[in-house]
Image (spheres, helix red, strand yellow):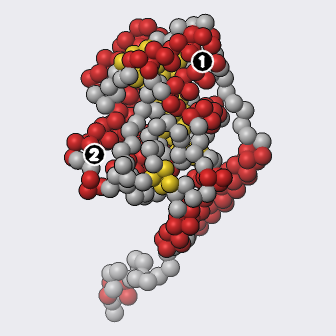
Amino acid sequence: MPSNSAAHPLATGPRRGAPEGRPAMLLKLYSALVLVLDIVVLVVRCFLSIGQAAFELVVPPKEKSVAGEVVLITGTGHGMGRELAVKYAALGAKPVLVDIDEKGNAETARLIADLTGKKAPTFKCDVSDREAVLALAGKVRAEAGDVTVLVNNAGIMPTHPLLKHSPQEIKKIFDINVMAHFWMLEAFLPSMIQKNHGHVVALSSMAGTMGLSNLVPYCASKFAVRGLMEAISEELREDARINNVKFTTICPYMVDTGLCEKPRIKFPSILGMLGPSEAADEIITAMRRNYHEVSIPRTLLNINNVCRVFPVKVCLLIKDFLDSGVEAV
């Protein structure tokens, strides 16, 4: 009589549907424990980060020194760019003035000389022209040294309905408001990365956080600036060798620089137009505290983020209530 093993050759192997072996079960248990531990660590770190942020609302981070830093600012011929240049100079930095307006730029240099007794180098440059920006980098390096703080401030803001914009005007908005940021980063970021020391400040806008009528191309360009800054910051964050090149995005509401020709403000006591000097103070403070993104006034960005949690209709109701924006020109 044949044995069972002869009649059934597979009888000695594992049966289909049989329990898994002990090593496989232990491996699954270990993986589950590791996952739970990772989640616990993540939750703890998240709460610590929230606690730190709450603490810094009461006790802001110490402002780092900018003395001796080579600070290149675009759009220094007037307005906020001029105020930034003068205030950085007063803090002991070495401002480099860049504008297409030579006369205005010279006036800014004179103000700095009167204040500090030192001459600030001035350069005429169309920052929307890549070749001009790359040539500028060589001139700046030869005269002032490597740029350690880059403030991309230059921008334009035509105000009329989208279909009233010419194709040339839309292209110009993006060339100055967006592409110039790419060319300036291409020219000046490599030396910051090489030295693991530097700071890039980009002027976006609250119009880069929400859509506004009569500002469609401008809004799109400022959304692009925020995306650029968030992405380049993340790209460098993932490289452990680069931990001291910082990025700060600024989202002003309305600043009296001449760009807002016909502002519409329902509650000026709450959302009034700021002066360029006040805005420049906020920008420099945000940079010196290494803030990632700041609105001017600071509460606006937080309010906007909270509103995004609610249905779109709620956001529109709040926007209609505030009734702020710009009229077409």
Q: Is residue 198 visible?
A: no
Q: Which residue is mark 2?
A: 170
Asked whether 155 or 26 is in front, the reply is: 155
Q: Are marks 2 and 1 in contact (CB under 8 Å)?
A: no
Q: Which residue ends up furthest to the bottom in the rendered image?
A: 1
For the point 53% across and 8% down, the residue is 119
Percent position (x, y) of residue 227? Answer: 42, 47
Asked whether 4 or 50 is in front, the reply is: 50
Q: Which residue ends up furthest to the left in the rendered image?
A: 167
Q: Is residue 72 visible?
A: yes
Q: Residues within 10 Å of mark 1 (few under 14, many from 20)?
A: many
Three-letter amino acid code at disc 2?
A: Ile
* Mark closest to the chain's N terminus, 2 or 1: 1
Horizontally, residue 166 falls left or right of residue 51, namely left
Q: Secondary structure at mark 2?
A: helix
Percent position (x, y) of residue 24? Answer: 51, 67
Percent position (x, y) of residue 139? Answer: 37, 12
Q: Secondary structure at mark 1?
A: helix
Q: Residues within 10 Å of mark 2 (few under 14, many from 20)?
A: some
Percent position (x, y) of residue 198? Answer: 53, 26
For the point 69% across and 30% down, the residue is 63
* Above-or-below relation of 175 to 99: below
Residue 64 badge = none
Q: Which quarter of the figure is the N terminus placed in?
A: bottom left
For the point 44% across and 8% down, the residue is 143
Write down the quadrant of residue 112 in the picture: top right
Residue 89 badge = 1
Asked whether 99 or 79 is in front, the reply is: 79
Three-letter amino acid code at disc 1?
A: Ala
